[in-house]
């Protein structure tokens, strides 16, 4: 069952000189409840604009977006949309507003008017979900970038959205922080059934999803399962995108005459394939 549907969506930015710049051009897509959809594309491809359309931060100039059947252009119901679709941005510092972790996670609940007796249990559960319980009374500025982003995720989880939209949430993190956040998202997706829409420019992150959409010049130009998309190496390179490192390695090895079988995309898969070749299997 779908939770989000975009139908022939167009969005235009108006420049100071009143000329228009079309950022999204006729995109149609659906997000199924419980799936992980990754959206990739180089800078300026329209992916961040698209994700802001999916939770009503922007409304389409043409076409429509519905969230659980609610049209995002229905101003009287926009807060219902925002409660169903939580948003995580690049910089966790922009989402952290309190001086103590547990108070920050409670902030959104207080603004929603949740009964005080319900707030602490929901904060506790959200912190448990991102493995940050032991930092509940710590000041956010004492945390690493990855830990801050996990606190930001907990703040959204506490509001119990149906969908987590993530706009390059690891872009400002080091490799350790990126791994922390992506492992957390993967656990929430697999164990809690959280619907995830992830914008990323790290191909190995997109590989974790169930489905990938590739954006180029405001259009969705490719769509499919990660293995279906990332095996189209030349097509992706032609629009300025990389592929997962192991996919690139397999592509180069084949070009050099090595009979790499299948489509290894992870280090483990590549090691297994190279061992197979060495043993002459």
Image: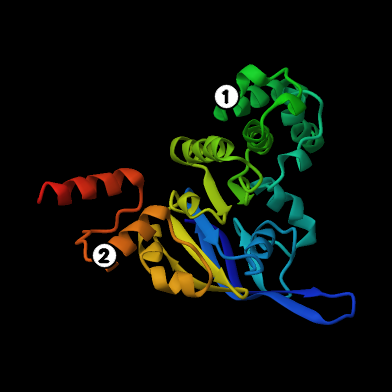
Identify the residue under disc 1: 128
Measuring from the top left, give residue 197's x and y in whole percent.
56, 53
Residue most toward the right? Answer: 17
Q: Rate crowding at label 1 as few (under 14), some (14 to 19) or many (20 or more) other CA atoms within 10 Å.
A: some
Secondary structure under tag 2 reads helix
Q: Rate crowding at label 2 as few (under 14), some (14 to 19) or many (20 or more) other CA atoms within 10 Å.
A: few
Measuring from the top left, give residue 257's x and y in whole percent.
22, 66
Indicate the quadrant where residue 105 lies.
Answer: top right
Measuring from the top left, give residue 85's x and y in whole percent.
65, 49
Mark identifier at residue 90 = none
Residue under the point 60% across and 40% down: 174
Residue most toward the front? Answer: 256
Secondary structure under tag 1 reads helix
- In the image, residue 186 sits, relative to residue 225, either above or below, namely above
**In this image, 80 relative to 195: left or right?**
right
**Foreground of the two, 144 or 255:** 255
Measuring from the top left, give residue 221's x and y in whole percent.
50, 74
Q: Earlier in the sequence, mark 2 or mark 1?
A: 1
Residue under the point 52% across and 47% down: 195
**Foreground of the two, 108 or 115:** 108
Q: Is residue 62 visible?
A: no
Identify the residue under disc 2: 254
């Amino acid at each position: 069952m779908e939770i989000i549907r975009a139908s022939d969506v167009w969005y235009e930015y108006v420049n100071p000189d009143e000329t228009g710049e079309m950022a999204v051009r006729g995109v149609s897509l659906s997000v199924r409840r419980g799936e992980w959809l990754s959206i990739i594309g180089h800078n300026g491809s329209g992916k961040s604009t698209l994700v802001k359309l999916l939770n009503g931060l922007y409304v389409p100039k043409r076409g429509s977006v519905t969230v659980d059947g609610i049209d995002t252009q229905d101003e009287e119901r926009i807060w219902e949309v925002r409660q169903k679709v939580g948003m995580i941005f690049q910089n966790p510092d922009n989402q952290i507003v309190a001086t103590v972790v547990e108070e920050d996670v409670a902030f959104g609940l207080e603004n929603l008017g949740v009964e005080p007796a319900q707030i602490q249990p929901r904060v506790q559960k959200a912190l448990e979900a991102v493995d940050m319980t032991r930092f509940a009374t710590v000041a956010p500025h004492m945390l690493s970038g990855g830990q801050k982003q996990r606190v930001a995720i907990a703040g959204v989880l506490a509001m119990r959205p149906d969908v987590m939209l993530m706009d390059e949430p690891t872009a400002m993190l080091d490799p350790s922080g990126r791994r922390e956040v992506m492992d957390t998202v993967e656990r929430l997706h697999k164990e809690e059934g959280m619907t995830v829409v992830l914008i990323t420019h790290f191909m190995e992150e997109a590989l974790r999803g169930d489905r990938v959409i590739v954006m180029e010049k405001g259009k969705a130009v490719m769509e499919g399962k990660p293995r279906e998309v990332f095996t189209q190496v030349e097509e992706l390179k032609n629009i300025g995108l990389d592929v997962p490192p192991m996919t690139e390695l397999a592509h180069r090895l084949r070009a050099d005459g090595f009979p790499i079988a299948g489509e290894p995309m992870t280090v483990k898969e590549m090691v297994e394939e190279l061992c197979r070749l060495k043993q002459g299997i």
